[in-house]
Image (spheres, grey):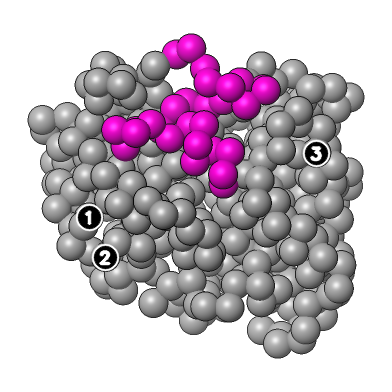
Amino acid sequence: MSERTPSDALKRAASDWRDWLMSCSLPLWWQGARINNGSFAEGLALDGGPLETRQSRVRVQGRQLFCFSLATRLGWSQPDLMSALRTSTKRFAVQCLRPDDVVGHMINIDTGDLVDDSVDLYDAAFFLLGLAEATAVLGHDATRASIDRFFSGLDAHIAYDATRGYREFLPTRDTRLQNPHMHLFEALLRLYDVTGELDVLSRAEALLEFVKEMFFDNDNRRVIETVTACDTDDSFEPGHSMEWVWLLGYHARLTSRQLDPFAVDLYERIEALDFKPGMMPLGVHIDGAITDPRRRLWAQTETIKAHLTMAEHHSDRSLYEQRAAETATAVQKLWRDRCAVDGGWFEHVDADGSITSTFMPASSGYHIYFAISELMRVTGLWQTHPTR
């Protein structure tokens, strides 16, 4: 990988996002969406005020624990930050796990009750990701029991054999889904990065082999979203392709291996479609036609991470750094600065860029903050190594 100094444009973009994160976004969400009992709200109103709902998905609890744990490692501090993170981490497993150690779906943020104990692998993935990031801050003693319970429930009730991945739902459904497996892979990589435990890496690599066999479409250079016994969808989500570019790059960094060639195929396939920076659509057909012209914020932040991955794995980084800087600036202008409250964001826009969001989902923070941390890491603004 090249050690060349990052471009000025990329450093400016990274600096802008870091300053916004530290001075605007983290204070807003810490004060507005964190509940004193350790839970987190589902989101904020577009003016920064509270939402009426007192219920929140388990995946949001995991993502918010991830966000504020990551923030401490990026250098953000509050007088009560560490004690609050300990409270949230301790409460997290108590309120989100069922008696059989399987992750549930929805909690009441005031009472801590698990009000919907249905099972979705997507929730489980972010339960683990939140605990993994908390481990990096609080140490394994604070999370080990909860992580052990998680794996016990996962292995007993959710796992198929090693070649079939995990049940996406209970009761089991016929359709296989790529997205929750992707995020479980991400969580396992993060936990391995934090702990260095080889059995966690083995889990991640076994899962990756299943995903490659089931969902990686080498012929069309795409990630398949759904697979049934007799069919696969001809459309795909370009944002997930970019997400996998970064994940395969993360795996390569952790294992000191070369970047998987499929990551390059995914990246070049999406770039050939020539979407405007910050305006990647939700759905594309294998022939290149847009099938869902709506835009989501998460797809744009994952594109930033994909550009950074390509920059790190090429001797000539300039093109990829330029793309990363342009996308980061476009996301700032289109998705961040149009928000009525400093530190907030929009998650949904329609085909022409008109805002369709009705509130600010807390779940978006995981995508934004992770992209900012990657901008900071690649440009040297994050001076300490983010892992072991």
Instruction: State the residue in front, 192 or 38.
Output: 38
Q: Are marks 2 and 1 in contact (CB under 8 Å)?
A: yes
The residue that appears at 58% across and 22% down in the rendered structure is 49
**Residue 10 x, y percent position in the rendering:** 81, 67
Q: Amino acid at mark 3?
A: Asp
Residue 139's label in the rendered image is 2
Query: In this rendering, is residue 281 above or below 3?
Result: above
Q: Residue furthest top?
A: 52
Q: Amino acid at mark 2?
A: Gly
Q: Magenta stretch containing residue 76, yes or no?
A: no
Q: Which residue is mark 3?
A: 337
Q: Determine the CA span between mark 1 and mark 3.
A: 37 Å
Query: In this rendering, is residue 201 above or below 315?
Result: above
The residue that appears at 88% across and 43% down in the rendered structure is 276
Q: Residue furthest left?
A: 99
Q: Magenta stretch containing residue 46, yes or no?
A: yes
Q: Quadrant of the C terminus?
A: bottom left
Decide if residue 271 is on the left or right side of residue 72: right
Decide if residue 95 is on the left or right side of residue 328: left
**Residue 266 x, y percent position in the rendering:** 68, 55
Residue 143's label in the rendered image is 1
Instruction: State the residue in front, 158 or 287.
Output: 158
Label 1 neighbourhood size at 10 Å, few (<14), some (14-19), many (20+)?
A: many
The residue that appears at 65% across and 51% down in the rendered structure is 23
Q: Amino acid at mark 1?
A: Thr
Q: Quadrant of the N terminus?
A: bottom right
Query: In this rendering, is residue 28 above or below 251?
Result: above
Residue 219's label in the rendered image is none
Q: Secondary structure at mark 3?
A: loop
